[in-house]
Every structure is written in structure tokens, then in C-alpha cells.
Amino acid sequence: MSSSTSVGTDEHPAVVLTGITKRFPGVVANSNVHLTVRRGEVHALCGENGAGKSTLMKILYGMQAPDEGTIEVNGEQVRFRTPSDAIKAGIGMVHQHFMLADNLTVQENVVLGAEAMHGIGKKARARIIELSGKTGLNVDPGVLVEQLGVADRQRVEILKVLYRGAKVIILDEPTAVLVPQEVNELFETVRGMQEQGYTFLFISHKLDEVRAIADSVTVIRRGTTVGSADPKTVSSRQLAEMMVGSELPSPETRESTVTDRVVLDVKGLRLMTPDGSRPILDDVDLVVRSGEVVGIAGVEGNGQTELVEAVMGMRKAGSGTITLQDKDITKLGTLARREAGIGYVPEDRHRHGLLLTQPLWYNRILGHQTRKPTAKGVWLDTDGAKKDTERIVADFDVRTPGIDVPAAALSGGNQQKLVVGRELSGDPVLLIASHPTRGVDVGAQALIWDEIKRARAAGLAVLLISADLDELIGLSDTIKVMLRGRLVADADPNTVTPEDLGSAMTGAGSTSAAVHETVAVEEGEH
Amino acid sequence: ACAKDSGGGNNNSSAGTGAACEFAQPPTAPATSSTSAAAGAKVDASALKIGLAYDIGGRGDASFNDSAAAGLDKAIADMGVKKENTRELSAAPNEDESAKQTRLRQLASEGFSPIIGVGFAYAESMKLVAAEFPNVKFGLVDGSVEGAANVTPLLFAEQEGSFLAGVIAAYQSKKCHVGFVGGVEIPLIQKFEAGYFQGAQAAAPKIKVEKSYITPAGDFTGFQDAPKGLESAKGQIEKGADVIYQAAGASGKGIFSAAKQGNALAIGVDSDQYNQATVADTKDVIVSSMLKRVDVAVYDFIAAVAKNDIASLPKVFDLKVNGVGYATSGGKIDAKLQGILEGYKAQIIEGKITVKDKP
Amino acid sequence: MEEKPHVPAAPRKRKIPGWAVGMLGVAGAIALLSITSMQTGFPQLTSSGTTQTAVRLALPILLAGLGGLWAERAGVVNIGLEGMMIMGTWGAAWAGYQWGPWAALVAAVVFGSLGGLLHAIATVTFGVNHIVSGVAINLLGAGLTKYLSTLIFLPLSNNPRQSPPVQPFDTFSAAGLGDWLGELEAGQRLFISDVAGILRGLVTGVSPLTMLAILLLPLSYFLLWRTRFGLRLRSVGENPHAADSLGVKVYFHKYVAVIVSGGLAGLGGAALVLNPGQLSYLEGQTGGRGYIGLAAMIFGNWRPGGLLGGAALFGYADGLQLRSGGETVLALVYGVVLLLGVIVVWQLIRRKWFSAAAAIVVAVLMYLLYISLDEIPSEFVSYAPHMVTLAVLAVASQRLRMPAADGLVYRRG
Amino acid sequence: MGHLRGKLLPPALAIVFSMLLCGAALVISGANPLSAFGAMVTQVGKGTTFVDIINSTGIYYIAALAVAIGFQMNLFNIGVEGQYRVAAVVAAVVGGSIALPPGIHTLVIIIVAALAGAAWAAIPAILKVTRGVNEVISTIMMNGLAIGLSAYLIRRDVFGELRGNNIRTAEIPESGWMPGISFGGGGTMFGFIFVAVALGVGYWVMMNRTRFGFELRASGESSTAASAGGVNAKKMVLVSMLLSGAIAGLISLPELLGRDHTFSLNFTAGIGFSGIAIALLGRNHPGGIAFGALLWAFLDKSGLALDNVGVPREIVTIMQGSIVLSVVVAYEVVRRFELASEQRRVGRELGTVGGAA
Ligand SMILES: Nc1ncnc2c1ncn2[C@@H]1O[C@H](COP(=O)(O)OP(=O)(O)OP(=O)(O)O)[C@@H](O)[C@H]1O
Ligand SMILES: Nc1ncnc2c1ncn2[C@@H]1O[C@H](COP(=O)(O)OP(=O)(O)OP(=O)(O)O)[C@@H](O)[C@H]1O
Ligand SMILES: [Mg+2]
Ligand SMILES: [Mg+2]
């Protein structure tokens, strides 16, 4: 643990947190946390889901008041009542979940709260365009945020911080939604700014990234700082073990379980934008076999979401057929498809996966409201649902005080485990998993991977969408690259590298032998 | 060139054209007019405990509830009824039957008799409560209860009074074009409409008569929406009508102001509205009012109960007993027109003219 | 629909700016009415009298709707507009009979704001469900004013339900212009006479309150969309967490918005009290106009220009039926047939066969209705505004977009 | 125990608070609040008031259930007011024009009323599902049209007949009535009250024990999660709106079948709006709604006694408004209080030893 070493030196650390404690009903999120961040460094914060990282950062940013403890910025003790106080002290924060108003323009989102700097008109616009370059944001400031993809939204978030002239920048899991190229671009930005004297607090569950970018690492476990590490020397495995406080299971070796029994067969799937101007999905053909994991790689916004939702029946396909185990399900609704044996781990668990204010067992019923063990005919079987929820909580190591707490009370990783557990119940034949481990810590990640592999070995077909290319390569038996609504290339997971995949995804073409183009990619306006 | 509009209506030249009516030959006026109903010896009603159950609005509504209240006040003044022996309750908007029943029952069980329900809305509840209290005397304004011996209906021939209002309108119109604005299209108000149409046409067979209602049956806001009354009347004035008869409760105020703004005339309803404080600013357009003497009916009923002579009450308070009539305040009805009106009145009383009570 | 002021649209990238679309729409609507009025022979459809009526009837609805707009842009659903409007009527009458119409306006705003303040305390500070609080305020507004009237107005007016008379505003007319337009209107020439009639209605007999309301609309637009205060206020309605994370005082802005909302609704109440035909408080005089204002605001997609359209549509249809009765409303049916004809052509161009077919069927049905009836039964004529509103909603494409955090309770942390 | 306290304490606090508020208002206006409240309480034992309260509770209960079904999935059905009006007039017309054996006749009237209410609700439902029309606007508009339709149907040249100065539909023959329970001088309790109770039980079972209730609640909580879980959002809008309308159609039946036997100008309006307040007061829970309906009915009926002691009856409306508001505020205050004490408890128990759940 880094102690207060600044005494006597002429230069104060950028930030010193001392003895921070924060309690929530039923949980102590931070307990006696100490943290020192030197000026000009990139300081990484690691820890399991729910370890208290975000909470600590929210305290530093003035969004939550600590129950105990003090904050020093540049050697001066401060007390932040609101984020404005923190912003005035030169602290900026990019939140784990987007803090953007969809129905406002990029410009409005950026200048909000900082109107005093350049007004809300032309001058502000000029300043935003000037700063946009730094973040790689390439859109007109007058565009509504709802029209942006996640990567651009992330850039807008960073833009907001830059616009306010923050010197200490908190990045809470900024890379969770980015592809490697974008991550690299972000890191270049960070390094460039670091040289200009900016200080960064960086949170990520991707430990390779942490080691690549950080100058020092602090590990938090169950609300307290358990130590620090030197990113130059520590291995990811060691870091992970510090985080969970025990040894990690060793990765099992890959062995193919692919059979030749076709489970999902998509033919000629097309889908147009609501105004009918251009296709979102263009002639997609896809086959997933029993025991096979088919991974779809692609930059966000190239049609992966729509593909999944079309297969789930949440969007009406324009043309084409979808067959599940020789049964044409093109015309069926979502419920009928689920009953036919599709499990679905949605990309946004809050929007599509959970009823946040309802208890865990009630959430168990969602999607299974017509099936055993949660229903008997038109009647719900609440006892069955509760019993089966207990099973999921035990099998999937969902950390919860009980199955009667509302889903909102769980940390994100634990919510995810619950969703995965639910979707693997009832013996599905096909699992559609969209970013199944997004923002989930290493322990939970390993557990979710194990469960998917186990089910695959038992014959489950899996359609996997992930922005985490390591995950995609590690889990998939086949990888397909999606670009502008088309499946443009196949990649061999045994040989392909994330970098190759990344360039195929952006349409730059790949020279690697592991990627075969299946469709000639015309140079578009992308 | 923005100018302040002066008080009188200079901004609405009435659209339609027309000349004064060609009148039918009016009947000749009788020598003497009929006698007042409430004549006779002084009655002592000091022993009575009188309860009044008003309809929505209650005392002070400047309409028929108030008229009923005036009857009670007169009884207090003339017949020695003690103020503390009276109780007045009023209905609330949107209340159900049981509230009306409770109101009547409260009065009955506390020994009030007679009990007067003001408004036909009390008909059903009075039927029930009267049966529970056979010794209590009930009076029901604007309604009747079949087969209940202790309920006295206090009904009016609004159509007869409205007939005369129609005659007045025809004679006051410069363009032989008049209008009627009703508050809510219910049978009671349709009686006004029917009589008015018949009267106007009797006086001037070629007259044009507009009619409109502010709201249909069931939406009683038409009785209290003066702005809409104003617009409705303005529409009629725009079409060319220059005398408007209103039976629209508190919305009438708007109709008077429309008349004032549109250089038209208006005829009031129920009480002598020329003398009513709430519409004092527009009194100069009020040529007359159709009088519906709820006060007389209430007073006579109390007197009859005191004398224990209910049978003497008229079945219907009509022109003959001065239960309905017209007001001459404001001096716009000259002697000639008054003579014509008395002529029609005599014919109605004699039965030579029967006035329809449905349009 | 009536003339719209120059209200720019969202700062969204579009080829045609929003105000131009609005003007086109207005021109289209006038053209449609003009043709209808010629074909059916009812000049009342576009007469200056009808226009004036429409303005008078739309005014309270517009002000209530504007109140709703302020609150909902800050994320607070205001179903309590009716109650705040009632408070406004009482306040206007109470001050108006003593100190004249300007005092009436001030008092109406103050009383309405008190309702708004209560709503803000309940929904913002105590996190009460917005609809619960709104419903409670409607009850409280009605109860409180009745109670106060019994205490204060009864001794003066002898009527517990009505206040003493209130001094009216003087009204103003553009005399020369009005006469010239009057000549044009009387000329009965297609389109020109119609436009003249509508314009003449708009410049004749205008009260200061009407001018104030018409000013408040662009003013609200300016404040909400062109100032930093407005940006903050709207951000609170879109994503309070984001706003909070940038140091915007969420509670403060919600409070301001809801209090202003109440004040505007109160002003709507004053418009009823100061209506030339009323000039007093009368129990029940709001008659559900607060709800209609809310509907007009939703109809207008939570935007001032749209709200004006919604209020004007309602006021126009109401004015038409009140002034001219069933035949003219039937003429409107003819107008709808024409409109559907335009839609059919449009859908055919866009190759939307199904929509075109549906429009044809409806158009034929409406036409049959038009030729088979002489007059719509009076019972339905009164609800012409309701039917017109439903019809427009059913035909118009629904790209309504309410503020994303509208109605959600925000708790810090 | 804490659980129960959290549920019962707030309403109790709210009622006390509202009484204090209204008491203060009464004192200011020079009346004696004690005699006013006393008169209201003693009124319950007088005449038929007790039975009237029960009857009224049943009617409000049905109305609030109709509203609550919409609320459960964030559908704001302001149209209950219009739906029950249309249902009442249609049921009265049909009931008065057919001759059937007792029992069956009544049943037919009930079914007709439910269908009519559902049909009237179907218009905004269909507009919402096919055209995306906001149900708040469309139901407000439909309420107006409902008055127009009922006025048209009771025209003398349509189905109406004149009764003195009143106008009404043909009287339903006795075979169509629903007998009540007579308490002699104490009044007659509507037989339909039992139907209301059954509806409440059915509502509870449906919401908590059936797939449909699950889908309804899921849609209300998160339409996106529900649709990913296989709930057809459009179908749910349609079905819940129709169900809400069908129940709304029953609102006027206690009076129609048990007392009035006809639809006339004396029709009791405004119950739909009260239903909104009561559903919210009862937090959409069948038990809470029953409590709210009882309270509402008590204030309504006992409030009639205020006239006798010379207190303005408007105080009742003020009390209703302030109770609605203070109940919810009280729930919030109690919730915050319990949260704070929970936080202190956790703090004590866990001290500074970390233990994220
Ligand atoms: N507003 C809140 N109310 C109650 N509990 C909260 C709240 N915010 C966080 N918690 C709890 O505090 C704990 C720490 O949460 P925090 O968000 O800081 O974790 P984290 O380290 O950021 O996790 P992750 O890696 O999932 O982002 C969790 O158990 C969480 O459930
Ligand atoms: N008891 C609670 N009551 C209310 N809100 C809570 C509670 N617990 C957690 N939350 C909210 O839910 C969020 C989930 O907690 P946490 O931060 O641990 O996970 P996450 O950040 O959502 O997910 P992930 O780590 O997967 O990105 C918290 O940020 C907090 O806002
Ligand atoms: Mg976090
Ligand atoms: Mg988290």
C-alpha cells in the first residue's frame, strides 16, 4: 500500500484519498481506503465486480459523499459537495455507464454545465471541433447523441472531460466497449496527454490493458485496498489472484465438440432501416451446429445487434428464412422461439435482461413464463421459480444476500451471472450470447466461459457476439466478420490474432492467412 | 394603426341582412289582466320546520335555486316562519342518488316538514324517502313522483312564458331574425326552446330562428361556461340574429356580453335579470326576462302546507296563475308591445293557443 | 390550423428547417379549408369571427399546455395542470375584482405557482409519483378554491360559487388593416378572402392577455432552447444523472420548471376569468381545460410550435361548432376527404400500397357520411374538437418523442 | 414486524396529518373541527349511511381496479370515465329492451356492459398499437365523445323516454335486477358488492399467480426486457386496455342493477377520476385499493353530515387531496427513515471490515 510519501517533497501528489469509508444499505462499498496518485501518472485501479472501484471514484468526483475519510488534491484538503466542486478542482470523470442525454446534440451534451466557458453557441462549437481531433471523434457537434455508436459515445464522454480542462481524469472502464484499434487510439491519446501533464485514474477488468498503460496499480478487494503492484513486472495472473484473493483455475485445453447436426440455419436474411433507405442486414447466411460456437466479430453498429434481434424475433426480418433444428421459425414470435429452445444473453442486461426492481426469483421467470419449472400452464409456479433460482445462485456463484433482493441490488457482474444462469436453464439447443462478459471481472468471466464451454460440450450451439476479441478467439470454433450488415470474412480462431481480426473488422482488409474474405469488400464511405 | 376598441361593439358588423318582420295579426288584449295567485288572508306558518334541498349551486346561484331561496325568505318575512326552523342543503356536482336520499332523509328524520327538493334530480330519491316518511310533506320543484300522496309536484309551464319571450323577440328584431341559446340540451330546456320558437313564429310567421345548445345532455358544464355561451351567441349574431333568448344558467352572462358586443338584444330567463347584480354591466341589452316564479311556487306551497290545503295549489304554475311571465324592467317593452303580449297571454290562458312543450 | 409564429425546429440536421415545415403546414391547412369552404359554401370556415373565437378558446388551452411543456421538459409530468388552473382562476378573480385585470394576471400566476410549488415539493423533494401528486393537486385545487370562495366571495356576491365581477382588459384592433382585410374577406375570392378572414380575426379585438400569451410562446422557446438555463433545464428532463454528474443543479431546475409551469397554468385560468363573456370566477369554469392543454402539448410533441398547433386545432374546431353548428362541422368532414385524397396521392408516390388503400377506404366512408347527412347530430357536434384531434392523430405519423426522463423520480447518488 | 409497520404507519400518519391540516383550515374559518369530525363519525351510524358507504366502496373499488390494470403496465387509462358511461347506457338500453328469465337477464346485462366498456377502450388501444397514438390524449378525447354518445342514445327519438323533466332509457324489467341485502331502515346493500370482491380476488390472483399477470407487470417494469423475454408488447397493450375497459364497464352496474334500473340524466359521473386517485392511493394493490375506496366512500358519505353543523362540505375534497398526497409523502419519509437506520445498522455490524455482498 502506498503511504503518504509526499511530506517534505516540494511536489504534492495529484490526489490523496485517506481512510475513505462508504456504506450502502446492506453493503460497505468502501472501507478505509487509501490511495495516492502522483501527478502525471496513469494509475490503474483493479478489483472484482462490486469491489468498490466505481464508488471510490464517484466519491472523488463529488457525486457521493464519503461517510468517513478525507480527500486531498494537490496537497490541499478538499470537500466536494457536488461534481461542480470536483470539476473546479480540475477533476473529470468518464463514467462506466454513459452519462449522456440521447435526445440532446453532441454539442449540448458537451457544453452542459460548462456554458460559462465558451457559451452554448458558435464559440463552443469551434472549441469542440478543435478538441474532437484529440479524441478521434469525427461527427458534427449538431448530431443527436442517439445517432452515435458506442465508441463515439465514449469519445463524447472524454470530450466532455477535456472541454472542462480537467487535469485529473478518471476513466471508469472506458475500454469495455472498444475494439483493439480503438483501444490503441485511446491509449495513444492518454499517453500524449500524460506527457502534457494530465493525470489519469484508470479502471479496467482487462488486465493486459492495465499492464500496458498504467504506471502503477492499486488493487481493491471487498471495499478495501489490498495492495499495489508494479505493472512492469506483475503478470496478469498474479494481478488476478490479488484481486480475488485466491488462485484462479487453470484454463482448460480446447478440444472441438463440433458435430454436423445443424441447429441454426439463417438464409438470405435482410433487414432495412425503418425509413427503408438502406439495409442494416444484407443477405446474411449463417449456420451454427450442435456443439459449435460461432463467433461474430465486428465494430459496433455493423448489424450484430440487429442480427441477434432478428434471430430472436424481436425485429421482423425483411426477407430470408431462419430455421431452428429443421423447423422454420421465421414467422414465430420471440416467446415461441424461446420455447423452441433458444436462450438469449442480451448485450444490455439492464435494458433487455432484467426487471431491476423485482426480486431475483421473479427475474428467473422472464422468458420462461410458459415453461417448467417456473410455470404450469397459465399459472406461475413461484415455488419452482424460487427453487431454481437458488440453484442458479449456487451453481453460478451469484453473490447475493438472498433471492428476494431486487436485481438492482446486485453488482453488474453478479447480475450477468444470473442472466447467463437463467438462459442456460431449461436445456436450450441454441444460446445467443451478446457480449456475455462485458464489464465482468476476471473471476466471473472465467466462470461464465466455463459454463458456456460445458454446455457446448453437451451439444449446445452458441452464437457469440463479442467486442472482446480474446474472448471471441478463445471461445469460438468458427469466427465470422461482420461489416456494414454483411458477413464479409471467416477467420480461424486457432491462428488468427486480435490485430488481424481488428483490421478485417474495420474493412481495411487483412493480409493474414487466418482470415478469408467471403465477400468482396467494396471501399465505402466508412 | 392599432386602436383601442371602445366599449360598445364596433368590431362586429352583423353579417346577415334583413328587414323588420311582417307581423301576424295580434290578438286583442283583454280588458283586465288575471289576478295574482297568492292572494288572500294572512297565513301563519310559524309552527313549520322547513327544509330545502337545492340542486347543484344552491342559494346564491342567481338562478332557480336562488329563486327558491327567495320564496323561503318571503315565507320567513310574511308568514312568521322562524329562521332557525329552516335548513338549506345543497347538492354537489357528480354526486350519486344515495347522497340525495341521505340529504332528504336527514331533513325528514330531524322533523322538517315540509321539505322542498329544488330540481327534477330529486325525483327518484324523493320517491324513496317520501315512502319512508309518509307523514312528512314534500314538495318537488320541476318534477313529480307518481303515486306518492305526500309529494307535491311544483311544475311550471316554461313553454308558455317562453312563447311570450318569442313574441317579444320578434317585435324587437330589426331583421326578423332571432336566436335561442340553451345551456344543456335536456328536456327542461327544450321546453323553453319549443315555446320560444312557437311564439316567435306566431308573431311573425316568416321569422328566422337560430338555436344552439352549449353542451349536450349529460355534460352539465354548459350551464357554467360563459365563454362558450359568448361564442355560441356570437355565431348566431354573425348569422344575422339580433335578439337572443338564453336559457343557460350561469353561461347566460356570456350571451349577454355577446349581445352587447354585437349590437344585439337579449332576453333573460328565470328571474328578472335586468336587476341582477352579476350581469349589471350588460343590463342595457336585456329587453326582458322570461320569469319562472319558483319563489311563488315555494311560497305558495309553504302557505298551503300551513293551511293544510295542498289541494288548492295549481297542478302547473302557468301563465294563468302567474307562475310564469315576463319582466318589463328597463322600459324596452312599450305599451303597444305590452298590449300585444297581454293579448297572446289571454289566448294561451283561454286555451285558444296551446303551446308545445317539446321541439 | 392558425398562423404559427416563427418557431425554429430542433437544432437537428434536416434539409428543410422546422419553421419552414410549420409555415408550409399552415399554408396547406389554409388552402385545404379554403377549398372546402368554397366547395361547401360555408364562409364561416375561414371567417374572421371564427378565427377570433378560435383564439379566445385556444388561449387557456395554450397557456395550460405551455405550463405542461415547462414541467415535462424538466422531467416532471404535470397532470395537475387542471388544479393549478383552478387556483389561477380563483386568484385572478380575487385580485381582479379589487385591483383590476393586471393584478388579476399577477395573482393568477402567483396562485398557479403555489400549486406548482406543491407539485415540486412532492415530486422532486419527496420523490412522489408524478401522477399521484398531480391528481392530488387537482383535488386540492378544486377543494381549496371552493372553500375559499365560501369564505371570501360569498359575503360579497351572495354566491358561494362565483366572485364579484372583474374589470376586463381593453381590447385592441388594427383599425385600418382590419378594414382593408374586411373588404378582401367580403370579396369571397378563393384563398385571398380566406387568408384575409383569418388575418383579420387575428388583428381584431386582441386583448393584452392574448398578446402576452403569444409572446410567451417564442419566449419559452428562446429560454428553453437558446439559453444555458434552458439547456440545463432540458438536460434534467432527458438524463438527470448525466446533468448531475456535470454539476447541474437538478433539483433547482426542476423546481423552477414546475413553479413556472404552475404559473403558466394559472395564467390560463386568468384567461378564463378575464374572458369578455365571463369576467368572474365561477366554480367549475375550467371544465377540464387543463387536461386538454396537456393533450395539446403531447399532440405538439413537447414543443412550443406543435403545442400552438394542437391548441389552435382544438380552439378552431370548438369555435366552429359553437358558432356555426352541425352543418359547418359536416363541411369539415368534406375537408377531411380532401386531405385523405392528398394522402392517397402521397402514399401512391411512395409506393405504400397498403396505406394508400386504407386511406381510400376511409375517404370513401367519410364521403358517404358527408353526402348522406344534412347535419351531424348535435350531440356529436359539441365534440367536434375531440374527433378532429383523434382524426389528425390517427392520420399523422407519430414521431412523438417525450423527454427521456419524463415522469421518472430522480434521487441523487 | 418492521415490514408491517412500513406498510401501515404511512397511511395512519397521512390521515392524522390531513385531519390536522383540515382542522387548521376549519379553525381559521371559525368552525369547530372537533364537532365537524364528530359529526362525520356519528353520521356513519345514521340512516342508511353505513350501507351507502359500503355500496360506494364497492363502486370505487371496481373503478380503481380498472385504472390499476392499466397502471400496472404504465398505460395511463384516463378513459375509465368515458368507458363506464358508454357501458352504462348501452347496458341500460339492452337490459331494458330484452326479456329473459331472471339471472340470465342479469348476466346478459353484465356481459353487455363489460363488452361495451371494452369496445370503447378498444379505440384508443387500437390507435396506440397501430398508429402509436398516445393513450393519454386519445382517452381524454374519448371521454368527451362518450358523453356525446350517451346523450345521443337517450334522445327521445333514439332509445330515450321522457319522465317528467328527466329523460331516461326504458326501465330494466325486474328479471334483470340484481337483488341486494336489505337492512330495513339501514338501507339495501347492492348485490354487486360481492362481484366487486370477487373481482379484487381475481385481480390479485391474475397479477401474482398467472402468466398474464407476470407479462403485464414485466411490461410495466421494463418494456424492453419484457419483449426480450418473449412478451408481445402490442398484444399486452391491447389486452390490458380491453380488460381495463371491460372492468370499467362494470362500474355503474351496482347502481344500475341494484337501484336505478335505468340510465337517466341523474347518472353518477366522475367515478372514473376518483378511481385514478384511489388506485394510486392503494398503490395498485388489491388490498390497498380496498382501503382507499373505503376511505373515499367514508369521506364522501359522512361528509354530508357537515352541512348539518354548518361546515363547508368542500373540506372533504381538501381532505381527499391532502390524504392522497400525504400518504405517498409518508411512504417516502418512512422509507428514507428505514434506509438510514439500516445504513447505521450495517455500519455498526460491519464496522470497517469490508464485506461487499
Ligand atoms: N447507489 C448504491 N446504492 C446501494 N449500493 C450500491 C450503490 N452503488 C454501489 N453499490 C454497491 O456497492 C458495491 C460497490 O459498487 P461499485 O460500483 O463501486 O463496484 P465496482 O468495483 O465499480 O464494480 P464493477 O467492477 O462491477 O464496476 C456493490 O456491492 C454495489 O452493489
Ligand atoms: N441496493 C441498491 N439500491 C439501488 N441501486 C443499487 C443498489 N446496488 C447497486 N445499485 C446500482 O446498481 C449499479 C450496479 O452496481 P455496480 O456498480 O457494482 O455494477 P455495474 O457497474 O452496474 O456493472 P458492471 O460492473 O458490470 O459494469 C450501481 O452502480 C448502483 O447505481
Ligand atoms: Mg464500476
Ligand atoms: Mg460496477
Image (cartoon, helix red, strand yellow):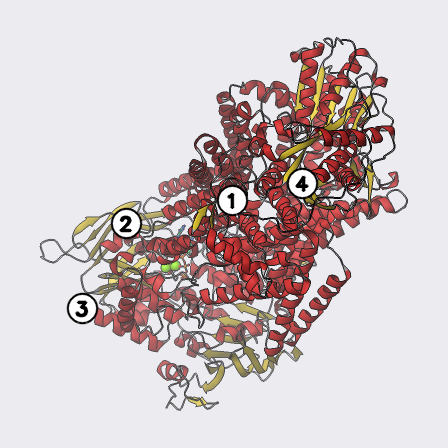
Do dots 1 and 2 share one subunit? no
Numbered tag placed on residue A20 in the rendering: 2
User: Residues under labels 2 and 3: Cα distance?
Assistant: 30 Å
The secondary element bearing badge 2 is classed as strand
Judging from the image, mark 4 belongs to the subunit labelled B
User: Residues under labels 3 and 1: Cα distance?
Assistant: 54 Å
Q: Are marks 1 and 2 in contact (CB under 8 Å)?
A: no
The residue indicated by pointer 3 is: A196
- Which residue type does callout 1 highlight? Leu
- Which residue type does callout 2 highlight? Ile
The image quarter containing residue B209 is top right
Q: Are marks 4 and 1 in contact (CB under 8 Å)?
A: no
Q: Give residue A14's position: percent from left, percent from top.
A: 19, 58
**Going 49% across and 40% down the picture, which residue do you hit?**
C270
The secondary element bearing badge 4 is classed as strand
Mark 3 or 1, closer to the camera:
1
Do dots 4 and 1 share one subunit? no
**Quick check: is the Cβ at mark 1 less than 8 Å away from ligand 2?**
no
Relative to B105, residue C134 above or below: below
Query: In the image, is D190 to the left or to the right of D285?
Result: right
Q: Are marks 3 and 1 in contact (CB under 8 Å)?
A: no
The residue indicated by pointer 1 is: C81
Q: Give residue B186's position: percent from left, percent from top.
A: 74, 40
Front residue (pair B347, D59)? B347
The residue indicated by pointer 4 is: B244
